[in-house]
Amino acid sequence: MMDNGGFCNNNYHSGSSDDELVDISDVTVNFSEDVPPLDLDYSAGGCKADWRPSNSPKLIDLMDYPVPGIGTYEDFNTIDWVREKSKDRDRHREITNKSKHSTVALLFSISDAFSGWLLMLLIGLMSGALAGGIDIAAHWMTDLKEGVCLNGFWFNHEHCCWASNETTFQERDKCPQWKTWAELMVGVSEQGSVNVLNHFMYVSWALLFAFLAVILVRAFAPYACGSGIPEIKTILSGFIIRGYLGKWTLIIKTITLVLAVSSGLSLGKEGPLVHVACCCANILCHFFTKYRRNEAKRREVLSAASAVGVSVAFGAPIGGVLFSLEEVSYYFPLKTLWRSFFAALVAAFTLRSINPFGNSRLVLFYVEFHTPWHLLELIPFVLLGIFGGLWGAFFIHANIAWCRLRKNTRLGHYPVIEVLVVTLLTALLAFPIEYTRMSSSELISELFNDCGLLDSSKLCDYSGNSGGTSGSVNATAANGLGARLAGPGLYTAMWQLALALVFKMLITVATFGIKVPSGLFIPSIAVGAIAGRLLGVGMEQLAVHNHDRKIFRGWCSPGADCITPGLYAMVGAAACLGGVTRMTVSLVVIMFELTGGLEYIVPLMAATMTSKWVADALSRESIYEAHIRLNGYPFLEAKEEFPHKTLATDVMRPRQSDPPLSVLTQSGMSVEEVERLIADTTYSGFPVVISQQSQRLVGFVLRRDLVISLENARRHQEGVVSVSAVLFTECGPPASPSAPPAVKLHNILDLSPFTVTVHTPMEIVVDIFRKLGLRQCLVIQNGRLLGIITKKDILKHMAQMANRDPESILFN
């Protein structure tokens, strides 16, 4: 057998090869050459005192002192969830132990436990305040395209006419204090040339706002464009994108979001508000040590911030929490659920205190319905669900095709021109039609509205004097239902809404993804609301004209509405949004919080589930997952199944034609050799083995930790030169008195890396990566290292098995 000093020198083998040591066919395994001696004493923190000559150089362990940068990650890398959670447990254990012996430490322990709730409070306050400012500014700048208030240019159209005593109820939007640009310039408001001038000013303001938005994004914060939710999902899964949640991104996204919404483009601010809230959370995390130094803890905060973003976007705190849980979060422990609820509550309260719309509501299109729905109405509700699913599948396919065209052609080289062209087309085509000229939020509010006696909208133009002499009309009027017969204004509104539907469906495809902040919630809701209102009015007129038929009997009664068209608009909105995003529970709760009516949950659920089923039958991906795949982010979708019967050996590297795996040895390598290996490779980490010959696995070390440790040793450890030994063990080999001191790096070595065997099914490997958030997994056989599987390898393998380009996975 080997002597006691054999473990700390390089004489591991006596001429035997690994094939001779391990004979698997005879089931005889000899690990004697690799087993460390049992009489090494680690009780004192090192090896036995007699292993090193008394005059040999002292081994200095720099890892006994904190080294800046150790445990951090480079850009476009994935965090190690297991290590981060272990670090947090060690920190919490240390604080708890100290608190038992000192009053100061006890107070520190209490403040540490309270810091999470304080952080949630600050995130809610900051996000709510920013959302209120965005709402007020966007409302004002949207109206600025049409005119200005003489009492004060900072008043929007509605606020300007509130204080006027000359406003009539039928023309509540007209008052002497509000002047269109044509009235200011030429002094008249009813001529054809005036409309041309108003149209010109509308387009000019839209182009100015869009130009400012895209220039600010390109110049100061390229990450401020788009929705942000695909990247938030990727970041929450453990990916690092430096600057995406930084202060410049927050400032520019807040400003340009107002400009983009005000330009009249077919986009919303709800998705970008999730990004804004996450930026607030990330910035505030830097003031709290336990969140600043731990990436996993920070992602818990970002999950709560996602809930805050939806809370202030829709005025739906509970829906926001469920959205974070269902749609964006990767790791969502129970305490994050409670803190998300608290942060969403604070944000909603802050926004309510600001009262941006002046109606004591958190959103512009809050509605209340009181008419009950009928069981047979589930049929049109399901039809709306089918439409929503078809629209969602069409939109995802068309938008991804357009974005891929932008990415792979010269179109992507001219983002400013693209934004201006899309804005010009939108403004030119939107101005002539009332329902496309108004902002999307105002349009949704109009469509959701339940017509009352005081409404002057075209959608509420009902009249019993239709001019007809047919018996059915006279019978309808005689039964007191004439008030629900469609008037000329309603017919005009119907064909205008039909044109608006086609316009919104097409222009939104080209708008989502341009280089300005652009959300998808509001355009999808607008498309669904238009379709729903059209169907709702059609069903209403069908019921009114055929009220004596058996199928409609009991639906209509004198003085009451037969059908609520606004309810159809709401159901259609939920169906289309669900078809695009594939949300279910959170979407129903959000719509419920918007309407405040419990009795409409069943129609919403029926339409939402139908929409998801239809959309999933055509395409399994939501719009966010499709954009994640388009951008090549390393995101393992938890909902996606892995149906293939492949093994770890089919995916691991190196392959048969590849060079050998780059590894470090636990002792026997010099600083120069390690630095050369780092310079010659781009890997994020290296396995550590006992020797190059045996390949027996010891652990795993991250590239960044290794680089920082070696640089720190060269700067601060006296006598370290290129030939100094690098040790990943507690003890070092015997060295001569003249040898330079060795560099001990055992504290940066992960001694328990996750390993699988070559015969492990890939479906199990994929599950391990998803549920534990691994960066890499080592493949071994009988203790011998054979290869490595990274998250990128898994994503490439899944793409290849799905007949997609495996090189589409862009990031490390």
Image (spheres, helix red, strand yellow):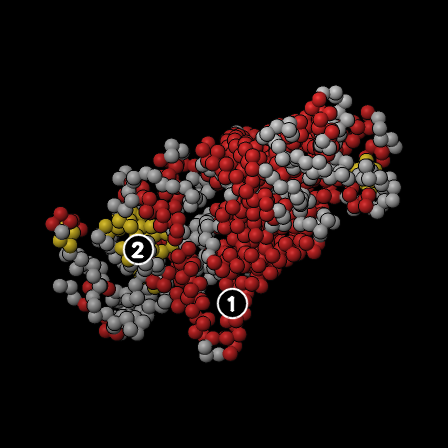
One can see residue 275 in this view: no
Towards the viewer: 224 or 398: 398
**Res. 94 mark:** none
Q: Residue at x 16, y 51 (%)?
A: 22
Q: Residues within 10 Å of mark 1 (few under 14, many from 20)?
A: few
Q: Residue at x 30, y 66 (%)?
A: 730
Check the picture and name the quadrant holding the N terminus.
bottom left
Q: Residue at x 52, y 59 (%)?
A: 338
Where residue 258 sits: x, y (%)?
Answer: 67, 44
- Provide the residue designation for mark 1: 113
One can see residue 262 in this view: yes
Q: Residue at x 51, y 67 (%)?
A: 113
Which badge, 1 or 2, is on the more N-terminal residue? 1
Where residue 473 sits: x, y (%)?
Answer: 71, 25
Task: Tell me the distance, in whole angstroms, between the alpha carbons under discs 1 and 2.
Answer: 38 Å
Q: Amino acid at mark 2?
A: Val
Q: Furthest residue to the top? A: 469
Would residue 553 appear left or right of 777 to someone viewing this image?
A: right
- Provide the residue designation for mark 2: 688
State how many labels appear. 2
Q: Amino acid at mark 1?
A: Ala
Towards the viewer: 66 or 152: 152
